[in-house]
Structure formats: C-alpha cells, structure tokens
C-alpha cells in the first residue's frame, strides 16, 4: 500500500535526523544572516540568531507553558524553555525525533517533554499553553486552516502564536504561478514530503477568520536565503557524504532538493514567512 503523507514525513525524519544532528547540531531550521542577508557568521550561530530575531520581532518577553509544533530533536523547545524558565512540550510525527529530544532534555536537566502527535489533531485540552511556537513545520501540513485552528485552540486567551514557515511568492489573478514555478515546487514537494505551500497573505487571511487579534506578518526571505549555500557547503564534506549513504535513499533524495531550494530563493519563488497573533 502507498504510504500516507504522515508516514512519509515520519520516515523522512526518522532516517535523516541523526545525520542532520551530526553535521549541523540540534537546530533543524534556517539561519539569520542580517536583514540584507549579508552578514558572515558561523552557521549554528545563524540558527540561534534566527530564534532570537524572531522572538524580538514578535515581542515575546515571557512564557510559562510553551508548545513547539514540529519540534524536531528539541532544539527550539529546549532553547525556549531555558530562555524563559518555562515548561516546554514538543510534538513531532517522528518517534526517532521524540526519543532523541527526550534524551537531550534529560541530559540538560530542562523541563521539556516530547511526544509523537499529529499537529492537525493535537492531544491537548483547549487553552493549555500561553505560547505556541512553530518553526518551519507549517509547510508539511496538508490542511493549513486546520493547522492554524489547532494552534489557536490550544492557546490560552491572551496567549501568542508565532509561526515561521516556507511559502511561495504572493500571487494575484494577473500574476499566478507560472508553469515553470509550479514544476519547481512540485519537485521540492516530492523530495521534502510536502503537500503544498501557500503565500504569506493566504496565511494572514486564514488567521483573520480565527479568534485572534494583533495579526502581524513579515517576509524574511532575504535574511535567510544564504542558509542554502551553507547547507550545500556542509553536504560536500566526506563525513556528510558517508552519512548520506548510510542514511538510505529517502535522505539521499532529500539532499537533491537543496539546490532546488537555493534556486527557488534566487528566483523569488520560495519565501520565508512569519506570522504572529494573540488569542482573544
């Protein structure tokens, strides 16, 4: 039987997360290279800087109960829990990621728990968290409206949603995606187990129909685009090549998408979108 999308995502991260941690460390997301994308810095520092810049942009000054949706191996969860002196919960479709994140939390003595769960049907009561963080997981969601609805549902009144996700360029009836653009996106979807991505204004429109206020969005594509140059450089090392071979075909296929993402940013097709809002 063909695998479902969730099964494909699970297998992709089950097989690739160990290699990513070996090469890159605990943070499985873009880095920040200054507003103009011109700052030179250590790639791991760039990832930390992205977290800090996003928090500053959204004005997150405190948090007590944090939910990390699409937590990976716990990089953001543990960072946020330590930064704010908070309890963090992370969810992922990958048992390998959840287990590794749990190990890392225990080793660090940080109050964080991790579990396998579907972000479209979260196993949490309404109003369980005061801060919901989603760093580059929205692109995997097959129902963007349900995804945002669930994120808002589990927020306490007054709590903050902060989502960072891959998007495509804004479109209008006069400027739809071209056939070539759609072809490039389809290749990326296939290699990275994505159902589809949408434009940032579409996310904002979804949020406007939810019980939230103070909706803000931003496009940081320029600031993060150099990340893919760094990934390509790191992938060309002997350790990375050997790790790819050991990780299997799923991970190798994913590596083929690196240059496609680089191409998408250079063409202005792939966009890096931020959205924040407070629950009513």
Image: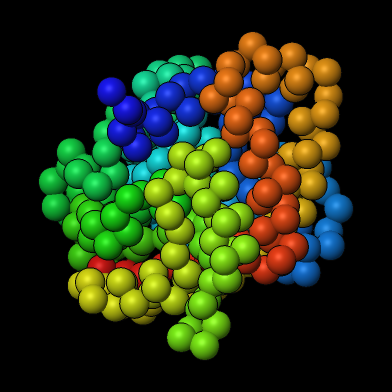
Measuring 57% from the left and 71% from the top, which residue is drawn there? Answer: 178
Measuring 83% from the left and 18% from the top, which residue is drawn there? Answer: 238
- Name the quadrant containing residue 246: top right
Quarter of the figure with the C terminus: bottom left
Q: Is residue 134 visible?
A: no
Q: Position of residue 204 (x, y in %)?
A: 38, 75
Q: How is the image coloured?
A: rainbow
Q: Position of residue 152 (x, y in %)?
A: 25, 60
Residue most extreme to the bottom? 174
Q: Is residue 115 above or below residue 262?
A: above
Measuring 69% from the left and 60% from the top, which residue is drawn there? Answer: 265
Measuring 47% from the left and 69% from the top, which residue is drawn there? Answer: 199
- How many marks do you count on the picture? 0
Residue most extreme to the left? 125
Q: Is residue 138 above or below residue 269?
A: above
Residue most extreme to the top? 246
Q: Nearer the viewer, residue 154 or 193?
A: 193
């Amino acid at each position: 039987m063909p695998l479902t999308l969730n099964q494909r995502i699970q297998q992709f991260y089950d097989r690739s997360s160990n290699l990513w941690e070996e090469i890159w460390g605990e943070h499985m997301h873009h880095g920040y290279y200054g507003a103009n994308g011109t700052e030179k810095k250590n790639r791991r520092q760039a990832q930390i800087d992205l977290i800090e810049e996003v928090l500053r942009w959204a004005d997150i000054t405190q948090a007590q109960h944090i939910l990390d949706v699409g937590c990976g191996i716990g990089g953001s969860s543990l960072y946020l829990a330590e930064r704010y002196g908070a309890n963090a919960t992370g969810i992922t479709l990958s048992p390998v990621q959840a287990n590794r994140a749990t190990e890392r939390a225990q080793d660090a003595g940080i109050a964080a728990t991790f579990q396998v769960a579907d972000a479209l049907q979260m196993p949490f009561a309404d109003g369980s968290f005061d801060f919901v963080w989603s760093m580059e997981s929205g692109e995997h969601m097959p129902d963007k409206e349900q995804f945002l609805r669930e994120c808002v549902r589990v927020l306490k009144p007054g709590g903050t949603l902060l989502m960072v996700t891959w998007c495509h360029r804004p479109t209008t009836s006069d400027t739809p995606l071209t056939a070539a653009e759609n072809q490039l996106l389809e290749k990326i979807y296939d290699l990275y187990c994505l159902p589809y991505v949408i434009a940032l204004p579409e996310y904002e429109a979804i949020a406007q129909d939810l019980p939230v206020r103070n909706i803000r969005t931003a496009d940081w594509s320029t600031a993060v685009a150099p990340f893919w140059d760094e990934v390509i450089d790191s992938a060309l090392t002997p350790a990375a090549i050997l790790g790819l071979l050991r990780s299997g075909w799923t991970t190798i296929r994913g590596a083929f998408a690196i240059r496609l993402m680089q191409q998408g940013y250079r063409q202005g097709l792939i966009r890096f979108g931020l959205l924040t809002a407070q629950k009513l």
